[in-house]
């Protein structure tokens, strides 16, 4: 089985965290995000083999560097670097020569615990050309909204619709099964979007396109607020069908603290993540927050509901609430932010 992971976007909405770390490898509970996606693929391996075409464009070397052998197991990764971003469908077209059968495509920024095996079975039974996994969200406006017929066929697709365009609440989860012929319809050598260009064309052509609604855990991690929620959800065990070997070891206060972090006396870390080589001085409090690797929090600093980038320095007695700081930010003693 082959999977294409679309990991070439710039992650602009997740700035400042993505200025020096591309979105596919920002850590969730101290584990590169991409590893969570690879966990989804293991059950789909055929005869123990899963080939992942990893479509990269933004900071590709940093992503390749994280893909160590131990973490991959049976998964074979083939990085495919686009010299300039080709768009979501352009990236699919780009790998066409390597595709040998039904292709699973994943957006590179979705955290989910979906079991894809029954989805693949239904795709085959229906002889679908394309199956889109769908999820229900309260506010669909920032997603691709899908209208379904009663038999699961897709009637309409509206990417990021303006208010009033549709009442449907099912959205494109960024997980597709595609038959290879569909890839031949994508023009080569130019930027082409799956959502805006290819999918409307497929709908007009009358091909069998199906939606498959899931109630699995699902989150697009692409903004700082959702990134923080993704960390909180992993800590709280909300990814139910998650392989136990990937579940983090928690402190009694529901946190993940890297073994290489140094916590001094009277430090309190609640429902938070502390990255490697962090130093938390006497009396520091961190609650509902993510502190990335190499950060230093001086005596008595309080960090609430915040995300601190790598190598941040928080001065003594400072209080931060609901802030997002980029890598190497410096906050002087007794500051108040948020
Ligand atoms: N290789 C490659 N080349 N990848 C790209 C490119 C490109 O030019 N542009 C974007 N991507 C990757 C991004 O890295 C990301 O993993 C994925 O494609 C989707 O891009 P986003 O920018 O995150 O899109 P979105 O979140 O606004 O919307 C998409 O995802 C929603 C679900 O999260 C759409 O597919 C929506 O329809 C969908 O509902
Ligand atoms: Mg996204």
Image: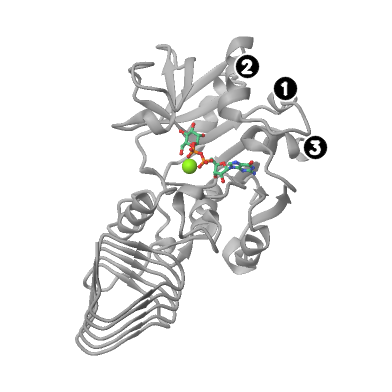
Q: Name the residue under label 1.
A: 185
Residue 106 at x, y = what percent?
A: 55, 41
Which is more N-terminal, label 1 or label 3?
3
Q: Mark 2 points at which residue?
A: 201
Mark in the foreground, 3 or 1: 1
Mark in the foreground, 2 or 3: 2
Residue 177 at x, y = what percent?
A: 58, 31
Tell me the element at label 2: helix
Q: Residue 211 carries which label?
A: none
Q: Distance between the residues labelled 1 and 2?
A: 9 Å
Which is more N-terminal, label 3 or label 2?
3
Left or right placement of residue 303 versus residue 159 in this view: left
Q: Please tell me how crowded label 1 is: few (under 14), some (14-19), or many (20+) other residues with Cα within 10 Å.
A: few
Tell me the element at label 3: helix
Left or right placement of residue 80 versus residue 305 in this view: right
Dot 1 and dot 2 residues touching (CB under 8 Å): yes
Q: Which mark is residue 97?
A: 3
């Amino acid at each position: 089985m082959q999977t294409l992971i679309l990991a070439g976007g710039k992650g602009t909405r997740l700035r400042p965290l993505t200025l020096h770390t591309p979105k596919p490898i920002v850590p969730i509970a101290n584990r590169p995000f991409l590893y969570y996606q690879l966990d989804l693929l293991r059950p789909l391996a055929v005869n123990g083999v899963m080939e992942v075409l990893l479509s990269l464009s933004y900071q590709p070397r940093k992503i390749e560097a994280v893909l160590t052998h131990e973490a991959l197991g049976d998964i074979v990764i083939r990085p495919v670097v686009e010299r300039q971003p080709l768009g979501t469908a352009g990236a699919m077209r780009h790998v066409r020569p390597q595709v040998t059968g039904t292709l699973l495509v994943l957006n590179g920024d979705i955290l989910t615990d979906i079991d894809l095996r029954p989805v693949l079975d239904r795709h085959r039974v229906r002889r679908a050309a394309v199956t889109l996994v769908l999820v229900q969200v309260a506010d669909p406006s920032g997603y691709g909204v899908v209208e379904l017929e009663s038999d699961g066929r897709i009637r309409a697709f509206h990417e990021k619709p303006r208010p009033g365009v549709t009442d449907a609440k099912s959205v494109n989860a960024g997980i597709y099964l595609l038959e290879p012929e569909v890839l031949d319809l994508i023009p080569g050598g130019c930027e082409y979007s799956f959502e805006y260009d290819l999918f409307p064309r497929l709908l007009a052509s009358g091909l069998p396109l199906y939606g498959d609604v899931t109630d699995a855990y699902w989150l697009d991690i692409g903004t700082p607020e959702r990134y923080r929620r993704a960390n909180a959800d992993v800590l709280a065990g909300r990814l139910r069908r998650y392989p136990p070997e990937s579940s983090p070891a928690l402190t009694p206060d529901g946190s993940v603290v890297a073994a290489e972090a140094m916590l001094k006396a009277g430090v309190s870390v609640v429902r938070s993540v502390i990255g490697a080589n962090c130093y938390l001085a006497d009396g520091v409090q961190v609650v509902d927050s993510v502190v990335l690797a190499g950060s230093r929090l001086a005596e008595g600093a309080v960090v609430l509901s915040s995300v601190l980038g790598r190598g941040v320095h928080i001065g003594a007695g400072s209080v931060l609430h609901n802030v997002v700081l980029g890598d190497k930010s410096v906050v002087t003693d007794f500051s108040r932010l948020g």
